[in-house]
Amino acid sequence: MEGGTVSVFGYGSGIIPRFSEVGSSFPESKEFHTLRVQPPAGNYYTTDMLRQLGKSWEKHGSGLSTFHGQTGNIMFIGATTENTQHF
């Protein structure tokens, strides 16, 4: 598979596709997509919401996340194409 985009049903954007050129040598690096989520108004999070996001990401992604980078989004780093639909 070379390049391209990944889409989530019902959403027009939010996924940055990443495909590795060394996937045959390092299978875990073959796909490592980033999902961007817009934070709630005022960046107000409840602990329940953060726990739900964290548990879902541990199950369907790599567990790596960043908050409020250059875009202000929550970024969930490291998912396969298949698992982007489940997250």
Image: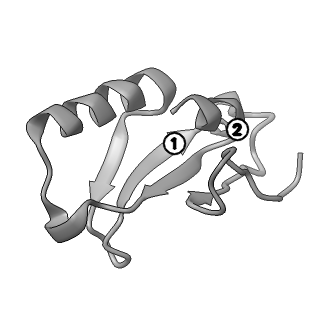
Question: Whole-percent x and y of residue 23?
Answer: 75, 39
Residue extending farthest bottom: 70
- Kindly identify which residue carries mark 2: 81
Report the side of 70 relative to 19 (left or right).
left
User: In the rendered view, would you say 72 is above or below 48?
Assistant: below
Residue extending farthest right: 1
> Which residue is located at x 66 percent, y 46 percent?
8
Q: Secondary structure at mark 2?
A: helix
| Residue 72, picture quadrant | bottom left
Q: CA distance from mark 1 to mark 2?
A: 10 Å
> Which residue is located at x 11 percent, y 43 percent?
46
Q: Nearer the viewer, residue 86 or 81?
A: 86
Kind of residue at disc 2: Thr
> Which residue is located at x 43 percent, y 21 percent?
59
Give the tally of numbered discs.
Answer: 2
> Disc 1, disc 2: CB below 8 Å?
no
Question: Whole-percent x and y of residue 36?
Answer: 46, 58
| Residue 32, picture quadrant | top right
Kind of residue at disc 1: Gly
Disc ID at residue 41? none
Within-10-Å neighbours for mark 2: few <14, some 14–19, many 20+: some
Report the side of 21 relative to 2 (left or right).
left
Disc ID at residue 78? 1
Q: Quadrant of the N terminus?
A: top right
Question: Whole-percent x and y of residue 78?
Answer: 51, 42
